[in-house]
Amino acid sequence: MATYKEIKGTNIEVLASDPSNPVIGQVWFNSTSNVLKGDAGTLVGAWATANSMNTARERLAGSGIKTATLAFGGYDGSGTRYALTESYNGTNWTEVNDLNLARQSLAGAGTQTAALAFGGLSGPPFIVHAQTELWNGTNWTEVNDLNTARRGLAGVGTQTAALAFGGEVNPPVSAATESWNGTNWTEVNDLNTAREFLAGAGTNTAALAFGGGDPKVANTELWNGSNWTEVNDLNTARNKLAGAGTQTAALAFGGDLDPPVSANTETWNGTNWTELNDLNTARRFLAGVGTNTAALAFGGSADPPTTAATEEWTGAGPLTRTFTDS
């Protein structure tokens, strides 16, 4: 039988950590974890089940990336609104310090250690909020409010340069867009289509808004730092969905088809949306972070119940596998 060296022309590499850009077919021994690994590659993206959040909830918000995420706020589906904050390290969720204001249907932006939370609904008595809070990696601090209080809005960007758009002012539905400079929110040009429970991706100068509304819409709009422009629609109209990625490479997943709840996943290439593999758990009112090739979906409502389910998205490309003797 031919050896690996005879086939590949080299011995299996011994590495202290997995290579950052493995080549499909590459095999290596990780001397830190003492396991043999290889890159199998994948032609299409797929969702994989990960460890659940500590507290099941819907209508929450998040910030960060697939392996370093912050989840905050939310609703238990039966009357309790949460201030809970959890941090994900790529394997497990850990409870950390709470928001100052318990609320649902809020939006978030930023990273795991430098996040922004804004808007939302508290109660009873039911109040729609403009409150903004800043996370420094340990605690939440109240900072300057949105100009327009609303729930069911979307947010993108960083802790010092965020964008808030859409939502509901209880009533009416809003098209308002606001830009955050690290200190204050400034009103800028509105969305073309006012809507709530939409999703977004990108930055405060290059954003994408998609889905939302009641009735549901498939509308997608592109923000260039000054104005919103309508572009090609989602394949499936839905609201209460989540988004991740950039203005030219986004991911849309989950949502509500009224009924049923949706597991649909679509990717945006800057021009069109393409349907991909579904979530394992169909749900609405979920949160999402990351990129269109490495995203995290967490929480939501499976209609019923409210779920703590977490799923990791790996897009087409390199995919590390661990070899076993079974």
Image: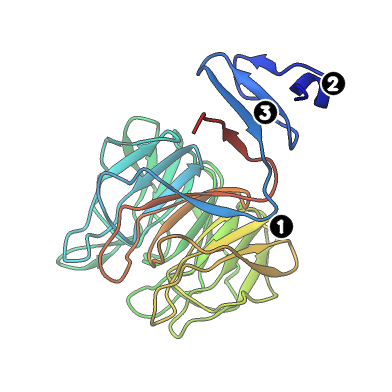
Q: What count of labels does the image hold?
A: 3
Secondary structure of the residue carrying tag 1 is: loop
Task: Of the two numbered discs 3 and 2 on the same chain, state the one appearing first in sequence.
Answer: 2
Which residue was labeled with disc 2?
9
**In this picture, is 90 found above or below 3?**
below
Q: CA distance from mark 3 to mark 2?
A: 22 Å
**Amino acid type of the residue tagged 2 in the rendering:** Gly
Image x and y of residue 279, in percent: 48, 61
Disc 2 is placed on an element classified as loop
Which of the two discs, 1 and 2, labels the residue nearer the N terminus? 2
| Mark identifier at residue 248 | 1
Mark 1: few/some/many CA within 10 Å (<14, 14-19, 20+): some
Q: Residue sitting at 71 percent across and 31 percent down?
A: 22
Q: Residues within 10 Å of mark 3 (few under 14, many from 20)?
A: few
Please identify, in this view, whether the residue under mark 1 or under mark 2 is nearer the observer.
Answer: 2
Q: Position of residue 253 (x, y in %)?
A: 51, 63
Q: Quarter-wise, where is residue 192 in the image?
A: bottom right
Q: For this rendering, which residue is in front, 63 or 302?
A: 302
Residue underneath mark 3: 20
Q: Residues within 10 Å of mark 2 (few under 14, many from 20)?
A: few
Report the residue at 15% width, 67% height from top.
125
**Mark 1 vs mark 2, CA separation in Å:** 40 Å
Q: Does 133 appear above or below 198?
A: above
Give the x, y percent position of residue 184: 48, 48
- Single out the mark in the foreground, 3 or 2: 2
